[in-house]
Amino acid sequence: MADSPDPRASPRNPDRGALDTVIVTGLSGAGRSTAAKCLEDLGYFVVDNLPPELVATMVDLGSRSHGAVTRIAVVMDVRSRAFSSDLRSVILDLAERGMRPRVLFLEAADQVLVRRFESVRRAHPLQGDGRLVDGIAAERIVLRGLREEADLILDTSERSVHQLRRALEQAFAVGGDLDGVPALRATVVSFGFKYGLPVDADLVVDVRFLPNPFWIADLREKTGEQQEVRDYVLAQQGASEFLDQYGALLSIIGAGYRREGKHYMTLAVGCTGGKHRSVVMSTQLAEILRATGIRATVVHRDLGRE
């Protein structure tokens, strides 16, 4: 099996139906936990260590969720004694019902697995009273048949965590760019400094350098969502230059975030009370982000607090 996605496993394949199911398995220490976190970031409902006999039940429940669950990932290991044969039976059963899951198989070289287990001082689940290498060898035998039937095999021996995430994103992301880079989601939060900084902000912008509409009698009771305030703020000296130059910087930052496997960015835009300037500028910055291919939403944290 080549180390690349099987065409029939493409998440864009319209013949797969509404429920996209992935089974994540492979050698212990090869990166299943990382894969689970990545798939969760990609919108999958992730279930860890589900017994093989319950996989079909989980898929059935997802199918009956009326769209609430559209993507399921089940992470499985060899702790079930009949793991391999049971799982293969489940896959065959689902395939006969038109719901064949994709199987992701993760593996690594023996010396790499030994090093990983020793670094965390854990025993291999099949090691028993033997050596670590004995457990790895036993697991390879148990999983041999399942590996041959996997849709995607990834060898993580030479992959960093970021490289593994990138490979999974290319195989399973929906809505990524044409170059295979996953789409970045941004939340632009307007806030008032007098209420404190948003604790989850990746970037903070201070727009108090712009004149405050609060001191304009006709604008004081209005908010940045109203056209009169928008026109006033955007007409101020430095407003358009700031948007142009900071927008260019955001384009560079966004591209770097995506290369590093970061999926989410929170940009906090602050003024004194979070009512006028930050509301206007956060809306404008969100539009700039969308123009660069970043999916941006706007949250006005402190609007209405005054």
Image: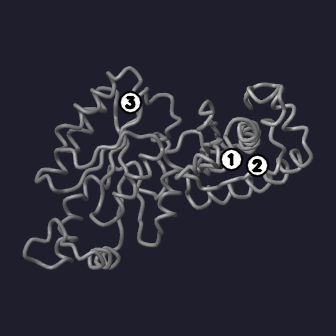
Compared to 212, does 250 lie above or below? Answer: below
Compared to 273, does 156 lie above or below? Answer: below
Q: Secondary structure at mark 3?
A: loop
Q: Residues within 10 Å of mark 1 (few under 14, many from 20)?
A: many
Whole-number angstrom distance, CA of label 3 to CA of label 2: 40 Å
Q: Amino acid at mark 1?
A: Val
Observer-nearest residue: 55 or 220? 220
Q: Secondary structure at mark 1?
A: strand
Q: Which mark, residue 269?
A: 1
Q: Residues within 10 Å of mark 3 (few under 14, many from 20)?
A: some
Q: In this figure, which residue is indicated by the disc labeled 3? A: 69
Q: Residues within 10 Å of mark 2 (few under 14, many from 20)?
A: some
Which quarter of the rendered picture does the N terminus lie within?
A: bottom left
Determine the residue positioned at 36% across, 62% down: 31
Q: 160 left or right of 58?
A: right
Q: In this figure, which residue is indicated by the disc labeled 2? A: 207
What percent of the width, then of the height, locates residue 213? 81, 36
Observer-nearest residue: 227 or 30? 227
What percent of the width, then of the height, locates residue 42? 48, 44
